[in-house]
Amino acid sequence: MDIHEYQAKELFRQAGIPVPPGEVATTPEEAEAIAARLGGKVVVKAQVHTGGRGKAGGVKLADSAAEAKEHASRILGMEINGLTVGKVLVTPAEDIASEAYVGVLIDRKSQAPIFMVSPEGGVDIEEVARVNPEAIRKVSIDPRYGLLPHQAYSMATFLYEDPALVKQATKVIGQLYRAFSANSCSLAEINPLIVTPAGEVKAIDAKVSIDESALFRLPEVEAFRDLDAEPASETKAREASLSFVKLDGDVGCCVNGAGLAMATMDLVKYYGGEPANFLDIGGSSNPDKVVAALEIITADPSVKSILFNIFGGITRCDDVANGIVTAMKRIDIQVPIVIRLTGTNEEEALEILKGAGFEAYTSMDAVVEKAVQLAASA
Amino acid sequence: MSIFIDRQSRVVVQGITGRDGSFHTHQMVEYGTDVVAGVTPGKGGQSFTSSTGKEIPIFNTVEDAREATGANVSVIYVPPAFAAGAIMEAADAGVEFIVAITEGIPVLDMTRAAGFVRDRGARLLGPNCPGLITPGQAKVGIIPGQITTPGPVGVISRSGTLTYEAVNQLTQAGIGQTTCVGIGGDPIIGTNFIDCLEAFSKDPDTKAIAMIGEIGGTDEQEAAEWIRDHLEIPVVGFIAGQTAPPGRQMGHAGAIISGSAGTAAEKMKVFEACGLAVAKRPADIRVLIGEALGL
């Protein structure tokens, strides 16, 4: 789960990291009032779950409260990478002597948290990795011992020469690991970590992603979830324990299993169609889940056909077929539905479905081709 | 022959009295797996009666179970909050092969458990995996037995039902399998593609391999390079998620394209460059395996 910059900064503050003050506004007037309270120059920053905010015009410097209001009115409601800005952070503008990068994330290869630090901050770290890889230092952390003092110190010396700065950075790196670990982050990043002309080290931007699987034990972090930042369909899917991602096509997909769901989307594309969604309905034959899935899929007006692709392994196909038939009685669907079931008891399942008036298949290719055709001719 | 499990495997089920644990214990015993013990804290001394009438003793700890029964394989159906602990308990008790079915284990928990298991020289399969099956001998996990049949193909996959799809098609085409292994869809897993490839390369009965990957990470690319440098037998590769958008998790916690790495296109390109036969859709896996075996 991605959280907003202002929320990430809150977690950083709790860990003791020096973060400038700031408040969130949802209207230009609020932004103006915050800027007036802070006094002096401020930055108005779009709060959206995507990078490239600056390039898109979502981060603006304001000399006065009136200017902050002006910027906020332009940024609020703006679309950045398809996401609408609903909130801005208003924070004092800091004078910057230098910018560094400090981040920690879960590294799949070493199966451990890994720090990445670079004296070249304020830019896309992937770009630095490509152009100037020796400007990045990576340090793998054994999660059983945590970040060791010498590791934090050696990273700090990679960033700065001045002992006073090294001392501050060592502390910040330790605090960042604490925030990362206490909040079960998959990523915690300060970019940039600045040095002010007065020689203070501060975090002026923050990016944090939380491991979804750990949220059950982090209620205060779960509360950061911004329902406005995701399509309503995805909120509904999560509440129904369905794994759903909205896409741009017109063939609705309802599949059991994540790998098979991806392969089904790919096959839609293979036959010249475009999938409308990723949806993993899971392993049960529960009609409630089928109803929820269909409600979510059909709420998307671009969906022109719906295909079910179910592999019945442990869950028997006839159970799944009965679940689908029961679900269909409870919901009125206007678009054509084609169903493919294969695996245990597939013959019985086909009879149940055909008896209820559905087009049923056992071949994945055949059902996908048919669904693509139906969408194209709708 | 086979990899990782066979009819000699003595299995302890952690979480045997839970809903999933009990259901799949029945299935495993029906298939012929030698389930010798169950573990549920607080229920030590009781026993579990399988659908076939077998009495399986329940212990409070894996250590007790191992001492009493000589179990050498563990399968874990414990809820996510306790699963990493269950994995470490099994490794501490000296179990050599640990299969973690549980989905949704916090990643930080897994970083600790993975290191713990490694240090004790045990092998972990999963988590968030369907387990594995050696057709005709034993299954550990949740793969439906009836879709498999003994034969010459090794199957390795990050997913569940997509594996069943491919295996079912092989079986229906009369092509059997040595062992089918689901390595799991999480970002941190105990056994990766290369571990399985290495094991298959030492199994004289495995004449071809189907490797089913998905978006996210670079395991498939490294596996392809390993195949190019070390493996004599043919490998057919498939990648799910060609239409997945970047930055979005596609069901599996590990199925996410982050930055420029981990796209299906990139993985398929490396497959081709390393000499794998690349299946464009699931139905091609069976066809290409057939060709590789000269059928």
Image (cartoon, coloured by chain):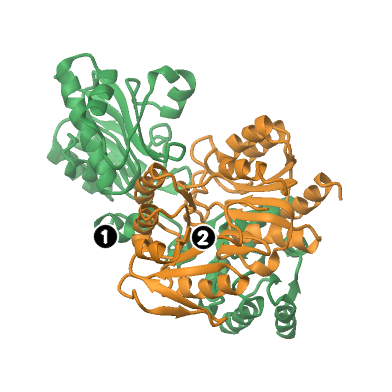
Q: Position of residue A18 (x, y in %)?
A: 17, 34
Which residue has dot 2 on it? A244
The amino acid on which the numbered mark 1 sits, given as a three-letter code, is Pro
> What residue do we see at 45% from left, 46% from top?
B188
Task: In the displayed orientation, state which residue is furthest to the right.
Answer: B295
Which of the two residues, A126 or B73, is positioned nearer the viewer here? B73
Any part of residue A66 in sight: no
The amino acid on which the numbered mark 2 sits, given as a three-letter code, is Phe
> What residue do we see at 56% from left, 61% from top?
A279
Which of the two residues, B154 or A345, is positioned nearer the viewer here? B154
| Same chain for the residues under marks 1 and 2 in the image | yes
Circle 1: element type: helix
Among the chains pictured, the one given orange colouring is B
Mark number displayed over residue A294: none
Q: Position of residue A290 (x, y in %)?
A: 56, 74
Mark 2 is surrounded, within 10 Å at the Cα level, by few (under 14), some (14 to 19) or many (20 or more) other residues, namely many
Circle 2: element type: strand
Q: Are marks 1 and 2 in contact (CB under 8 Å)?
A: no
Distance between the Cα atoms at labels 1 and 2? 23 Å
Among the chains pictured, the one given green colouring is A
Any part of residue A115 in sight: yes
Task: In the displayed orientation, state which residue is furthest to the top.
Answer: A161
Which residue has dot 1 on it? A219
Task: Using residue B156 as the reference point, say whether residue A228 is left or right of it.
Answer: left
Count of numbered marks: 2
